[in-house]
Amino acid sequence: MGIRRISDDIKAQSGWFGDLNSPLRFIVSAMLYANDDGAAEFLAEIETVRQMFRTARLRRGGIYETMAILIMRLQADKQPIATSTVDRFQAIYEEMKRHHWWLTGPDDFSRVCHPRRSARVRRRDRRTHRADSIRD
């Protein structure tokens, strides 16, 4: 299954006015493809985590919310996102708002996800660091 196929699946399953019914779905599709993930699984995760966000009383974030869910999903190696992850997300977001209440909004959702990188990214960073040190 290629990027175009995943993109078409996302477009068909997200509806006419969904967050992913824009060219951004190609970027999401590429990320899903690179991580051996599929559209149906990701869209189901979005619905589940959005309910968890509403329960945690987080603001609706549109595409920013969708991208944050994608990041959390990849960090969890495609495992279901736990309630504890959403609680941690909310705590970090609230702390950001406490320090910069006039600047912090849903567009910061992806930044909230960034503190913990996935095992795959950490391995890649270690390889890059080793390669850089060999060159020096």
Image: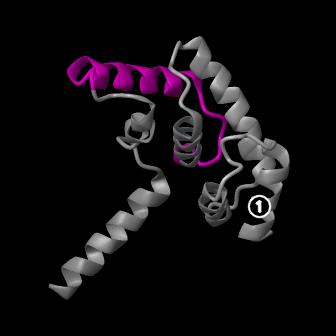
What's the residue at 81%, 47% (across, down)?
A: 40
Please tell me whether residue 92 belongs to the stretch shown in magenta: yes
The x, y position of residue 54, in whole percent, is 60, 16
Q: Check the image and name the residue furthest to the right.
A: 12
Badge 1 element: helix
The x, y position of residue 104, in whole percent, is 33, 28
* Quadrant assignment, res 66: top right
Q: Is residue 13 toward the left or the right of residue 123 in the image?
A: right
Please tell me whether residue 117 belongs to the stretch shown in magenta: no
* Quadrant assignment, res 136: bottom left
What's the residue at 44%, 59% (across, down)?
A: 121
The residue closer to the viewer here, 32 or 27, is: 27
Q: Quadrant of the N terminus?
A: bottom right
Q: Main secondary structure of the magenta part?
A: helix
The x, y position of residue 2, in whole percent, is 76, 71
What's the residue at 64%, 26% (across, down)?
A: 50
The residue closer to the viewer here, 104 or 33, is: 104
Q: Label 1: which residue?
A: 6
Q: Check the image and name the residue furthest to the bottom.
A: 135
**Mark 1 belongs to which amino acid?**
Ile
* Quadrant assignment, res 91: top left
Q: Is residue 92 toward the left or the right of residue 48 in the image?
A: left
Please report the bounds of the magenta region as a residue range: 75-102
